[in-house]
Every structure is written in structure tokens, then in C-alpha cells.
Amino acid sequence: MVKLVKTATEFELSPTLAANEMVKSRRAEGKKAYHMGFGESPFPVPERLKNALKSAVDRKEYLPTAGLPELCETVAAYYKDKAGLDISKFDVLVAPGSKLILYALQMAIEGDLLMPDPSWVSYKPQARMLKTAVIMVPTTLDEKGYHIDPEELRKVIKQARSEGKNPSKLILNYPSNPTGLTIQEDELKALAKVCVEEDILIISDEIYGFVSFDGVYRTIAQYAPTHTAITTGLSKHLSLGGWRVGVGFIPKAVDGLQSLLRNIASETWSCVPAPIQQAVIEAYKGHEDIEQHIQQCTDIHALMNKYIAKGLRSLDIHAPEPQGAFYNYPNFEKHRAALAKSGIKTSKDLAGALLKDYSLAALPGTAFGAEPEVLTLRLSGCDYDGQTALKAYQGGAALNEAFIEKYAPRVKESIETFERFIANISDKSKAA
Ligand SMILES: Cc1ncc(COP(=O)(O)O)c(C=O)c1O
């Protein structure tokens, strides 16, 4: 009998994809469903990029494993200009999605992974595939953002070392999936100091860096350029997930890292398709129309996700105002007693009840590393027609509640669904 490797059999279908499939099948049956489970930015491909791709179809050759040189140079100049990155300290790597750069980085750096709780769904499975141990780092969430106490981080590192573990790399993501929150500048600075002193490589996942509601691009690389590898790409601020364009900024100070990553690339994905690389040079030239498109999409993400947070807060659910990306990560702790009376004791129970009884797909906090009994969900605010919404905004429509009602009715109805859910839970609890 053909046997599967043990690590591979541990994986469920990625929870985001599972929620996606359930919503699809409900809608195929003509039933209503609210999709807060899948975080895909809904906006269309800008005309300039469509045209650039059309003109690049004749490119068919393999490209250098680090990326098309003209693209690498353009990307570097863009990040110098827009993110204030000292690009003289980094090499650029272009790959089919930042996910593969994250995987290659985990593969390339020996030792255990420090991972904040909560974190994006794929870091831990990637670590498991590579047989890397994961050490959790606690966080707190509030109106100021997503916090990791630097001294707590140092304590976790020292404790792990005293137990014979080898913490060597820390993944940070800001603005973050799942929280929609970011890490403030002074905190990035303090975390950078700890990582440099403890010789930890920071893998800085900045995929939402330009989906920042205050318009500030933050990077910890500014404070620890010798100890930071940045991953980013076009999947979020340009809604181009399916084009598979990931970009890495690899610190020159880590001797041999870029050449090891190039070797990994050459033995696996080889290169991002040539027409795509040629076309996306235009995404990094700073064209006014592209920059405007990014800003407009970010404005709409801010409207939707702040609206969701406000609606949840009015129901006594902990939901700090989002600062970036397209998510909320509410905590239902205040309703724990009432929820328990309906048999809801874990985040999986909570997501299950919403899906089964309210046709609302959300992801449980466990998918992001939270303990089962922590009553958190990740909600994504992308369930609307991005093309129509963007066109309306470009046409002068104001971004307010009427906009949501007209162009994102399911987002509004999702909040009404939560209102019904909380009311029903409370009624049941009182009746019991
Ligand atoms: C936090 C985070 N990092 C990385 C990725 C991977 O993006 P991509 O591989 O499309 O660049 C995602 C996509 O969902 C994400 O949410």
C-alpha cells in the first residue's frame, strides 16, 4: 500500500479554503450565506496592469531565479521611496507568492520558530512540514494595536534556551491577519533591539504594509536591518493574489542567505512566470493611477472593517478599531456565560453555530493558534462586489453607511446577523 508521510497527514484542508467551499455550495443551492471566512481583496485588476500583461505574452523564457533584473531594480526603488527602506542593505528575491518566500526562509534558517499568538494560519503548518518546533509568544490587542511586550519576548527566548530549545527566528506581521491591527513604531523599535541583542532573525511579513489605514508604511527593518528579512508582494494592496507575485528583501548581513534562497528557488519553483514579472514592473513605477487605485481600495477596506468593528462593539463584543488589512478578530468573552448555556464553549463551537444556524462563515481563533476555549473569531470584511464599489467611489460616492448599504449589503446584513445571534443567545440564557 502506498503510504503518506506522517507530517502531511496531519494537515486539514486550510480552514480558509474549507469555509470558502461551504459558502459556495450554499450559494449554489440558492441559499443566503455571509462570507467572513475568506480574506480575498475584491477589487479588479487596474487597466494599466491588464495592458502590460497583454503586451508581455510573448515572454516565455526562464528568468533568473532571484527575479527579472529590471523588476528587482524597480521594486527596490519603490520600497526606498514609499517605505523608506535602506535598500543598499538588502537583496531582492521575487517568488510565486510571499508564502513560498516565508517557507523558504523557514527552511533556510536553522532553529525553532517564535510565533505570536494569534498569527496567520500558514506559519505553523509550514514549520511542521519542515519539522521545526514552534514557540508561542503572547500578545495583547487593544485600541492602540497589536502588542508584544519586548521583555516578555526576551523571557520566552531565555526560557526556551534554558529548556534546550533553539529559538532563532521570529515571525511578525503588521498590519496583521487575523487582527487587523498593527504594531506601533516605538514597539517595533523595542522588539528590534531584543532581536538584535538575542541574535534572532526577524521574518517581517509586510504583505499588508500598504493597506494601512493611517497611510504609514511601517517596517521593523528600519531598526534591525542586519536581522530582518521582509516578505511582501502584490496579493493584498493590489488584490492580485492569483498572479502569484511575492517579493523578499533579504538582509545582506546574513552571509549566504540570499544564495541559499536562490538555490531553494532553482530546485523548486524556478521563477515566477515571465509575462507576469514583465507586467508587474508597472505596479512598482509609482504611476499616479496605480497609487490612486491602491489608496482608494485601502479607503474602502477601512470603511468596511471599521463598520464591522463598530457594529460588534455595540453588541458588547471586544473589537478594537482596525488599523489595516481587511480583518477583525473579535473576542466574545463577555458573552461566555450566555454562550455556554447554548453549548458554545470554544471558538470552533462559535464558528460552527454561526455557520449552521446563521449561514455566516467565520474562522475560529484556533486556526490562528489561539487556545480552543478563547472565544475569538476572524472575520474578513470582503464580501461585496469590489468592481462596483470602487467605481462608485471613483465616481464621487461618499464612504459612509449608505455606501455600505448600497454597495456591500451583505456586510451590513452580517452585522444584523450578529445582532440576531447575540439577542437569541441572551434570550435563551435568560429562559434557562
Ligand atoms: C499574513 C499573510 N501573509 C502572507 C500571505 C500570503 O500571500 P501571498 O502568498 O499571496 O503573497 C497571506 C495571504 O493570505 C497573509 O494573509
Image (cartoon, rainbow, N blue to C red):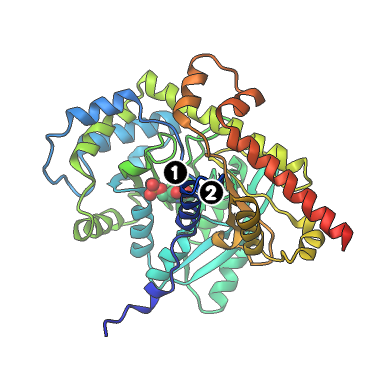
Pointer 2 and pointer 1: residues touching (CB < 8 Å)?
A: yes
Q: Is mark 2 within 8 Å of ligand 1?
A: yes
In terms of sequence position, does the residue under pointer 2 or pointer 1 come before the other?
2
Which numbered tag is attached to residue 29? none
- Name the quarter where the C terminus is drawn: bottom right
Residue 205: x and y in percent read 45, 49
The residue that mark 1 highlights is: 207
Residue 187 at least partly seen: yes
Looking at the rendered image, the disc whose residue lies closer to the viewer, 2 or 1, is 2
Q: Amino acid at mark 2?
A: Asn
Is residue 148 in view?
Answer: no
**Residue 18 picture location, percent across and down:** 47, 58
Q: Residue furthest bottom?
A: 1
Which residue shows up at 59% across the image and 40% down it? Answer: 185
> Are there few (<14), some (14-19), or many (20+) residues within 10 Å of tag 1?
many
- The verdict on label 1 being within 8 Å of ligand 1 is yes
Left or right: where does residue 402 sit relative to residue 281? right
**What secondary structure is found at the residue carrying circle 1?**
loop
The residue where tag 2 is placed is 177
Q: Residue at x 35, y 64 (%)?
A: 107
- Residue ID at (29%, 46%): 93
